[in-house]
Image: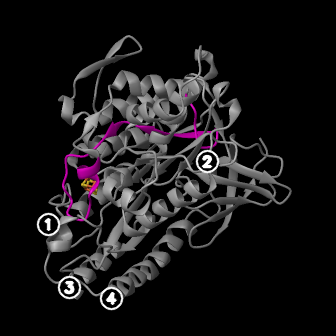
Amino acid sequence: MPRKKEAAIQPKVGFVSLGCPKALVDSEQILTRLRAEGYDIVPDYEGADLVVVNTCGFIDAAVAESLDAIGEALTENGRVIVTGCLGAKEDVVLAAHPQVLAVTGPHATEQVMQEVHRHLPKPHDPFEDLVPPQGIKLTPRHYAYLKISEGCNHRCTFCIIPSMRGDLVSRPISDVMREAENLVAAGVKELLVVSQDTSAYGVDVKYRTGFWGGKPVKTRLLELAKALGELGIWVRLHYVYPYPSVDDLIPLMAEGKILPYLDVPFQHASPRILRLMKRPASAENVLARVRAWRAVCPELTIRSTFITGFPGETEADFEKLLQFLEEAQLDRVGAFAYSPVEGAAANQLPDPVPEALREERRQRLMELQEDISTQRLERKIGREIEVLIEEVDEEGAIARSQADAPEIDGLVHIPDGEHLEVGEFARVRVTDCDVHDLYAEAIEA
Ligand code: SF4
């Protein structure tokens, strides 16, 4: 597509962001840099001088979605720079779409900016104050993802993220805290801490001491959680593995410093399958750990994900997984039938499980979990809880409780909440529930 004449005055970039919260943070960093340099971000292909597509390459369905998105951007605009996880497989992108301007990998803000400069020169005299201190956020104003590290030191056999994103690199704690403070100052009410392995924060820098608020603070999850807990907002931890060190976080949750919520991707419960998966902390006695956490913090919500039909999974392994779910009584569970990701070591394992059986086991797992989740929610009926308001219209309000992460967990429906304000906290009384959601009535302040 020929570049528009006004590009020399204010070049315009379109942006498509696919993938997980970590990719979303990458998108926000690129958008922040673009705005800082004076580029205009436009919401449609037509008005853009070029389009950046941030892709996902985690499973085959995500690869297909990313290739479709690149194709659409090429058809609608014609000038496309590809970045993100699928960008790590340049050959796949170029085989499908040889006409793209450039391909960069994940977490590659600098390379994306270089390519943007090459194909759409940056305007003169950019004003630094075009960008608010908190950067450009793609999430609603009241919550934001806070990425604390990049890459991963583990080598789970079903995952190709380390080959795309490299080993763990932790951000300095002073940078993380500065970003958190800027976000809070900009009105953010909830920070969602994300990374590939949140419990490993600081391992790569040997828990180096940094500074925040004039005080020395170690680059370690416990110290980070304590510091974030001082900001007076909701702090939610994602992608935490059940290492013994996580035990130290639970008292902070019981004291209300950070949310009583842990997103722990267990993936399986059969020790044999966990070994085949090469999962971190797979040797830990997870059930005992979950019980100990709940003894310290009874309000704790545990979310997890599981894979069914991993190569070599027998009916007995799967039964162990179901038994674990019965005993662990997790609050929120997502399950995926095993999907052989191209390049993953697990594809070489013997005894693959037929696709239909992988899916059948996923459905059996979810049926069991639906009963457990419903029973966990029923215990909240009659209680008064704090919620964060997400949407309001004439039919009432929709909110999230401390037990609900955005996008992945449930919601709280408040039919008489039309007077409530989006982005504000409110107190409600729970009146009913279904499998995932709560229903509640507003409590007048
Ligand atoms: S912990 Fe495992 S699944 Fe998670 S990013 Fe690292 S290698 Fe992949």
Along the viewing direction, whichever of 282 and 58 lies nearer the viewer = 58
Quadrant location, ligand no. 1: bottom left
Q: How far apart are marks 1 and 3 (CA)?
A: 14 Å
In three-dimensional space, the C-alpha distance between marks 2 and 3, rounded to whole angstroms, equals 54 Å
Specify whether 370 is left or right of 271. right
Q: How far apart are marks 1 and 2 (CA)?
A: 51 Å
Q: Which residue is drawn at 55% across and 27% down?
A: 134
Is 136 part of what is drawn in magenta?
yes
Q: Nearer the viewer, mark 1 or mark 4?
A: 4
Q: Are marks 4 and 2 in contact (CB under 8 Å)?
A: no
Q: What residue type is labelled 1?
A: Arg
Q: Tell me the kind of residue under disc 3.
A: Thr
Q: How far apart are marks 3 and 4 (CA)?
A: 11 Å
Which labelled disc corresponds to residue 357? 4
Examine the rendering and report whether any part of residue 429 can be seen: yes
| Magenta-highlighted residues | 135-164
Q: Which of marks 1 and 2 is nearer the N terminus?
A: 2
Q: Residues within 10 Å of mark 3 (few under 14, many from 20)?
A: some
Note whether 372 is above or below 262 in the view shown.
Answer: below
Label 3 beta carbon within 8 A of ligand 1: no
Q: Earlier in the sequence, mark 2 or mark 3?
A: 2
Query: Residue at left 24%, top 70%?
Result: 269
46 vs 163, left or right, is right
Which residue has dot 2 on it? 1
* 257 to 227, vertically: above or below: below
Residue underneath mark 1: 275
State the image quarter where residue 229 is shown.
Answer: top left
Q: What element carries label 2?
A: loop
Q: The disc labelled 4 sits on which kind of residue?
A: Leu
Q: What element carries label 3?
A: loop
- Work out whether mark 4 precedes mark 2 in sequence or the reverse, and give the earlier one: 2
Residue at the spot of label 3: 314
